[in-house]
């Protein structure tokens, strides 16, 4: 289908799970306007919160890599392109 996906705006931050269960050890995410449930491990919440920054950095890196053709750069370029497509296209 290749439609461009629009992500919920960040920045995201990790928040305590809003479930109110005693001894809950999971986390949620919030961008100040929306909260994304709970049930994330701390590692998964950290990765999800960093995702918008990681995507932006990878997009900038991809633009740089296209000026350095060759076996190593081509592999990195293809991997970066696939990751960006996975995050931004249906």
Image (cartoon, rainbow, N blue to C red):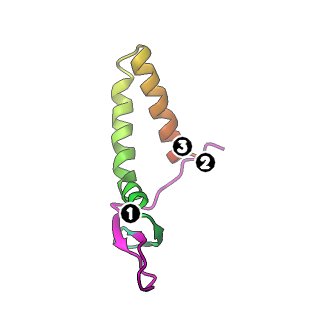
Residue at the image point whose x is 33% and y is 49% from the top = 53
Residue 34, given in percent of the width and then of the height, sits at 42, 72
- Kindly identify which residue carries mark 3: 86
Q: Bin the neighbour count of mark 1 within 10 Å (Cα to Cα): few under 14, some 14-19, many 20 and up.
A: some
Q: Which is more toward the observer, 18 or 52?
A: 18
Going from the N terminus, do you reach mark 1 or mark 2 first?
1
The residue at the point 40 percent across, 15 percent down is 69
Identify the magenta region. Answer: 1-28
**Can you give x and y, in whole percent of width and height, for residue 65 in the image?**
36, 25
Pointer 1 with pointer 2, Cβ within 8 A: no
* Viewer-side residue, 9 vs 76: 76
Which label is found at residue 63? none
Q: Residue at x 52, y 35 (%)?
A: 82
- Residue on which the image places disc 1: 42
Residue 27: within the magenta? Answer: yes
Earlier sequence position, callout 1 versus callout 3: 1
| Front of the two marks 1 and 3 | 1
Q: Residue furthest front?
A: 23
- In this view, the residue in front, 47 or 89, is 47
From the image, tell me which residue sits under label 2: 90
Label 1 with label 3: CB-CB less than 8 Å: no
What residue sits 38% from the left and 38% below the top?
Answer: 59
Q: Residues within 10 Å of mark 3 (few under 14, many from 20)?
A: few
* Alpha carbon distance from label 1 to label 2: 27 Å
């Amino acid at each position: 289908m290749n439609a461009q996906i629009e992500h919920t705006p960040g920045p995201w931050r990790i928040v305590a799970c809003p479930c109110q269960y005693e001894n809950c050890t999971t986390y949620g995410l919030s961008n100040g306007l929306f909260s994304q449930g709970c049930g994330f491990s701390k590692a998964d919440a950290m990765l999800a919160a960093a995702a918008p920054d990681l995507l932006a950095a990878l997009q900038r890196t991809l633009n740089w890599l296209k000026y350095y053709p060759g076996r190593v750069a081509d592999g990195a370029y293809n991997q970066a392109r696939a990751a960006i497509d996975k995050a931004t296209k249906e």
